Image (tube, rainbow, N blue to C red):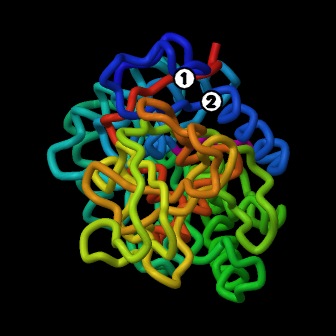
Amino acid sequence: MTPASDPKSIDTLPAGATGLLTIDLDTIVANWRKLSSQAIPADCAAVVKADAYGCGITQVSRALAKAGCRTFFVATLDEARAVREVTPTSTIYVLNGFFPGSGDQYAKFDCRPVLGDAVELAEWDAFRTTSGWEGLAAVHVDTGMNRLGFRIADAQALEARIKGGKHGFALVMSHLVNAEMLGDSVNGRQVAAFREIASLFSGVPASLANSSGIFLGSQFHFDLVRPGAALYGVNPTPEADTPMQPVVDLKARVAQVRTIEKGETVGYGGTWTARQQTRLAVISAGYADGYFRAAGGIDNLRSAEVIAAGQRCPVAGRISMDLLAIDITALPPGAIRRGGMVTLIGDGITVDELGRHFDTIGYEVLTSLGRRYVRAYKGGA
């Protein structure tokens, strides 16, 4: 994971490095600014859970804070600590709630739990009473996800506490079920239910929209939007062209170039058969590096592709733990050599495209990016 000194050149990589993952912090900032402008007058937070979707929580949080982001969402207290170390004055919400006995950690890192039921609220209140700490919390209301969150009736029962003042709530929030589908009727039902709840939480800022929710319209924005995946280049509007810029570039080393004859197969299970004499490049990346086995080449089915010498080349055969093969027959002889690099993400291959080949989504592609790659960061100053 040692950063390369020059992210634009493979010449600076250690001799044994199998790949280079370059993360463009300036582009993450640009994506955040675009989302911020889309949501005006609402404030725009940043979700940096899961190591900032695989991009590096420390580097991303620092860059976004320098750009003006004041509010961050994480999933765990460990993630909150990482954000606090580089953003001393930011507001940090911990989405996964208040675990028993965790109050001291919230006070230590000056972060806020997102409370999801009456038991958590009671434990939070007890901690604040016994410790004397006056930290605030968010209330999560379940409007249809059926994951975390107060039931609507239970949230409504908090109205008396809100009217009583000194309730300790800094935010009321919910989460959209299917925001990426612009015409889904559940979006309308959720925003209506949340609007009613938010009206009961008088004076408490409200938040509903995730990345995709920002593009559903201003009625979904409330006081704070909280994009995550879109910051990192995932398309928040899959029914249309992406409004976001790609953030990651992944290159992997060529371990070997070889020729096989017509009729020979490649990889475990012999799922891919050469239809002619075929040149292969064997690449030092596999499913242990986050390049999913589902993307392997199978006869008569379209596989994932890799950019080699400026051209798209299909994956040939199943993906192994540490290796994958690509068909480079269409390239001029000598265009690809042992020790050179090919592009797995970048040059037009997006995380969303790979997600389709992996039978998953761009979120999982990003959060699975391997730890054996050398990581390099661009920008963020």
Q: Secondary structure at mark 2?
A: strand
Q: Residue at x 44, y 67 (%)?
A: 295
Q: Is residue 60 left or right of residue 237?
A: left
- Quarter of the image holding residue 122? bottom left
List x then y, in percent, for residue 156.
Answer: 51, 74
Which residue is label 1 attached to? 377
- For the stretch drawn in magenta, the main secondary structure is strand
The residue lying toward the viewer, choosing from 2 and 298, is 298
Residue depicted at x 47% and y 46%: 53
Residue 93 visible (yes or no)? no
Q: Position of residue 280 (x, y in %)?
A: 45, 54
Please provide percent x and percent y for residue 15: 34, 18
Most foreground residue, 203 or 344: 344
Decide which of tag 2 and tag 1 comes sooner along the chain.
Answer: 2
Region of the chain picked out in magenta, as a range: 43-47
Q: Quadrant location of the N terminus?
A: top left
Vertical position of residue 60 compared to residue 38: above or below: above
The answer to whether mark 2 and mark 1 are in CB contact below 8 A is: yes
At 74% from the left and 59% from the top, the residue drawn is 214
Q: Secondary structure at mark 1?
A: strand
In the picture of the structure, the residue carrying the numbered disc 2 is 24
Pinpoint residue 268: horizontal percent, then vertical percent: 25, 69
**Badge 2, how many Cα within 10 Å: few under 14, some, many 20+?**
many
Q: Is residue 102 magenta?
A: no
Mark 1: give few (<14), some (14-19) or many (20+) Cα within 10 Å.
many
Instruction: Between residue 311 and residue 78, name the one nearer to us.
Output: 311
- Which amino acid, mark 1? Tyr
